[in-house]
DNA sequence: CTTGGTTGTGTTGGATTTCT
DNA sequence: AGAAATCCAACACAACCAAG
């Protein structure tokens, strides 16, 4: 992969990189709450669900600056046929990939068919939980969390319901990661009443999609905004954005992709199990400049281009939905001329279609090559 | 020790988008 | 069109740290 091309494909040019404050709505207080309120028996039941392993996640402090540095290095890429959306970041002198593969290996959440909309799935289910605990009224995340907190450890909610409500609490506060003034997703409260259906739901696809949407839009247009702001008389010069969704998955992936982060002491390996989110404790929140000086300015940085599942991981249920041939091991770099920057929305669709028509043959060939190389690499690794 | 800068976090008004 | 849901961003504040 030519460095020059990679450089040109950056969504934000090197000279336009800007400092910013970053926060996420992914709140791990849910796990602390659940641990303090559920009985040992209820915790065992929770542990057996699709979110059970998250009980063992260590401290997860978000380093907004670390995430920001990576997001600043996003490349323009072309999606290949039905390829699920994939990020490529130009870090050091190479690219690193964040796709559903990485999300899956980090979180242990299943990737699967999500053709049917979630609210449709639970349409026919009754609203028993909603009615018995909230009289079918509005339930905002904050209200729900407070209600849960006030239950205390000695409540009279039965074991099964307690586990179901805890699942929703974790889903809303941590995985979905949104403003806590928003309402919880009522369809999830219906779905959870059928635990089997809930456990089999492709949460990985759902949460990854949400996280991807937020990560891919949070920087759009912000470099220009930053410049404007610097020149304006506004008192408030700092750029700031919030990331929705499950940012922790992005950070833990980044820790594995850029080993220097852990070497500098910002994260420490506490385990060697699956999924990988259980292996890391995150404590460091170094500044933007410090990160540049110690990590991002280096061109010979050691990185992991993409995550490769271990022998153990390929046997896991959550891995079953992944078809690796759908995930290119090299980005389909798009040059600035082909990118959508500065193109009006109306014209954009047509432009894209033209582009695809022009390069379809090449893209096909390239993908075949990519898949071949990938298969060979996989064989070598095994 | 103080000071000033940077960070994450919490709270909030209000703008924007989506739903009905 | 109007309401509800969702998101943006302006603060305030405490913890931390490095320089003076």
Image (cartoon, coloured by chain):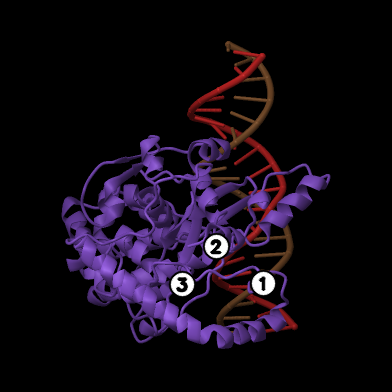
Chain colours: A purple, B brown, C red
First in residue order: circle 1 vs circle 2? 2
Query: How many residues crowd mark 3 within 10 Å: few (<14), some (14–19), many (20+)?
Result: some
First in residue order: circle 1 vs circle 3? 3
Seen at 51% across and 39% down, the residue is A291
In this rendered view, identify the residue nearer to me: A12 or A100.
A12
Image location (x, y in percent) of residue A271: 22, 45
A337 to the left or right of A31: right
Query: How many residues crowd mark 2 within 10 Å: few (<14), some (14–19), many (20+)?
Result: many
Image location (x, y in percent) of residue A252: 37, 51
Q: Have a look at marks 3 and 2 and say if they share a chain.
A: yes
Chain holding disc 3: A
Q: Name the mark on residue A20.
A: none
Query: How many residues crowd mark 1 within 10 Å: few (<14), some (14–19), many (20+)?
Result: few
Compute the Cα span from label 1 to label 3: 21 Å
Residue A186 picture quarter:
bottom left
Q: Name the mark on residue A337.
A: 1
A129 to the left or right of A196: right
Q: Name the mark on residue A75.
A: 2
Chain holding disc 1: A
Image location (x, y in percent) of residue A65: 53, 45
In this rendered view, identify the residue nearer to me: A214 or A12.
A12
Seen at 48% across and 49% down, the residue is A92
Image location (x, y in percent) of residue A155: 27, 54
Q: Have a look at marks 1 and 2 and say if they share a chain.
A: yes
Look at the image and tell me whether residue A155 can be seen: no
Q: Is residue A132 above or below residue A14?
A: below
Residue at the disc numbered 3: A85
In this rendered view, identify the residue nearer to me: C13 or A269.
A269
First in residue order: circle 3 vs circle 2? 2
Nearer to us of marks 3 and 2 is: 2
Nearer to us of marks 1 and 3 is: 1
């Amino acid at each position: 992969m030519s460095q020059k091309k990679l450089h040109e494909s950056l969504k934000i040019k090197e000279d336009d990189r800007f400092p910013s404050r970053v926060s996420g709505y992914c709140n791990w207080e849910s796990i602390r709450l659940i641990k303090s309120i559920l009985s040992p028996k209820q915790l065992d039941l929770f542990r057996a669900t699709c979110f059970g392993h998250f009980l063992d996640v260590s401290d997860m402090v978000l380093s907004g600056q670390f995430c920001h540095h990576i997001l600043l290095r996003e490349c323009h890429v072309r999606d290949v046929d039905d390829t699920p959306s994939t990020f490529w970041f130009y870090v050091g002198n190479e690219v690193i990939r964040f796709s559903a593969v990485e999300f899956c290996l980090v979180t242990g959440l299943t990737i699967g068919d999500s053709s049917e909309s979630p609210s449709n799935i639970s349409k026919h289910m009754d609203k028993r939980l909603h009615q018995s605990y909230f009289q079918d009224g509005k339930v905002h995340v904050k209200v729900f969390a407070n209600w849960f907190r006030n239950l205390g450890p000695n409540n009279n909610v039965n074991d099964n319901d307690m586990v179901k409500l805890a699942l929703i609490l974790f889903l809303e506060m941590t995985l979905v990661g949104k403003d806590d003034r928003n309402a919880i997703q009522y369809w999830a409260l219906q779905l959870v009443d059928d635990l089997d259906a809930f456990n089999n739901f492709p949460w990985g696809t759902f949460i990854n999609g949400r996280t991807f949407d937020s990560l891919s839009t949070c920087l759009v247009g912000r470099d220009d905004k930053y410049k404007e702001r610097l020149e304006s008389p506004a008192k408030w010069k700092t750029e700031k954005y919030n990331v929705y969704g499950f940012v922790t998955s992005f950070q833990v992936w980044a820790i594995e992709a850029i080993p220097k982060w852990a070497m500098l002491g910002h994260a420490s390996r506490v385990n060697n199990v699956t999924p990988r989110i259980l292996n890391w404790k995150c404590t460091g929140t170094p500044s933007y400049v410090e990160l540049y000086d110690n990590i991002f300015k280096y061109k010979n940085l050691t990185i992991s281009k993409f995550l490769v599942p271990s022998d153990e991981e390929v046997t896991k249920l959550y891995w079953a939905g992944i078809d690796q041939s759908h995930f290119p091991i090299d980005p389909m770099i798009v040059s600035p001329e082909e990118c959508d920057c500065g193109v009006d929305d109306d014209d954009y669709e047509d432009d894209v279609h033209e582009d695809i028509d022009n390069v379809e043959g090449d893209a096909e060939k390239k993908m075949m090559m990519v898949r071949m190389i990938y298969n060979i690499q996989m064989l070598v690794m095994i």
